[in-house]
Image (spheres, rainbow, N blue to C red):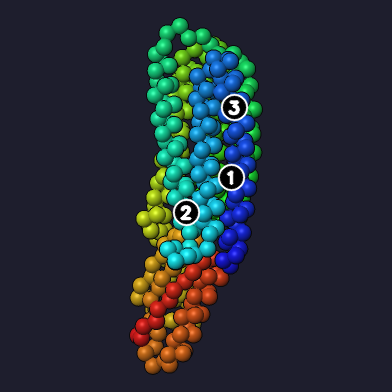
Amino acid sequence: MEQQKYNDLKKGERGVILSICAYLFLSALKLFVGFTANSDALKADGLNNATDIIASIAVLIGLKIAQKPADVNHRYGHWKSETVASMVASFIMMTVGLQVLYTAILSVFEEGKEAPNLLAAWTGAFCAIVMYIVYRYNKNLAEKINSQSVMAAAKDNLSDALVSVGAVIGIIGSQFNLVWLDSLTAVIVGLLICKTAWGIFRESSHDLTDAFDEKLIVGYKETILNTSDVKGVKNIRARNYGNNIVVDAVILVKSTLELKDAHDISTNVEEILIREHGIYEVHVHVEPN
């Protein structure tokens, strides 16, 4: 199973590399057309993609570090590097989101602005389609390999596609004597960047502080109680190591059992949890009832 986990991380790199390539192309295109066509919304969208390049590189580095095996200083492996990378990406996105927001708000009150060229709208529409395709690819990949950082990248891809759609709406609206709409759309772009960054940060910090979904705990407990010869569950805890779940449980068995029989029951519980719930590692302690 461990080798499969490492292989999944390797597959995750493909999605991140695809995102980086897409961002390199689209950010250059948006910034060039944004300045040429005088569109604040498209320029903000281009800056958003430029920061996504840095964030994606951080995620790629995290995926590579996570593949390193356990060593003397990391007895549990380097799995959490992927989660740390997601958090770093959120910081980068938030910083640029606030900068885009600040610049866009100033632009709203700027006088004498002219409506941007419609070329900016066509560019935004093309970029939205490209990013949606990248989003679908990364989302499917993240679900297949159960990767938190790749899913974070996919969410960012979708956010970028929606931002481009918003930019198109703002640019087209500015053609109808609503020049301020282009700048207002840039403000919305900045808010969306910050919202995406906050969502990724919240999920990453949740895992790094060992918080865990209580519904999953309940499911694990039910599975243990349905296992033969288990009389009860005294305690059960779980935490995430990157995309891997580790469970610690204390189960109750008959006090008259031989040590070997009690050990066999704990081993059986461990194997069932791993098989039925896809848990990476399970530690079961036995106590007499």
Dot 2 surroundings within 10 Å: few (below 14), some, or many (20 or more)? Answer: many
Circle 3 residue? 28
Residue 110 in picture, x, y percent from top left: 41, 12
Circle 1 residue? 16
Gap between marks 2 and 3, in whole Å? 30 Å
Quadrant location of residue 220?
Answer: bottom left
Dot 3 surroundings within 10 Å: few (below 14), some, or many (20 or more)? Answer: some
Q: Residue at x 58, y 55 (%)?
A: 9
Quadrant housing the C terminus: bottom left
Number of marks in picture: 3
Circle 2 residue? 81
Residue type marked 2: Ser
Residue 156 in picture, x, y percent from top left: 52, 39
- Counting residues from the start of the chain, the first of labels 1 and 2 encountered is 1
Gap between marks 1 and 2, in whole Å? 15 Å
Please tell me whether mark 1 sits on a helix, a strand or a loop: helix
- Counting residues from the start of the chain, the first of labels 2 and 3 encountered is 3
Residue type marked 1: Val
Gap between marks 3 and 1, in whole Å? 18 Å
Residue type marked 3: Ala
Residue 186 in picture, x, y percent from top left: 47, 23
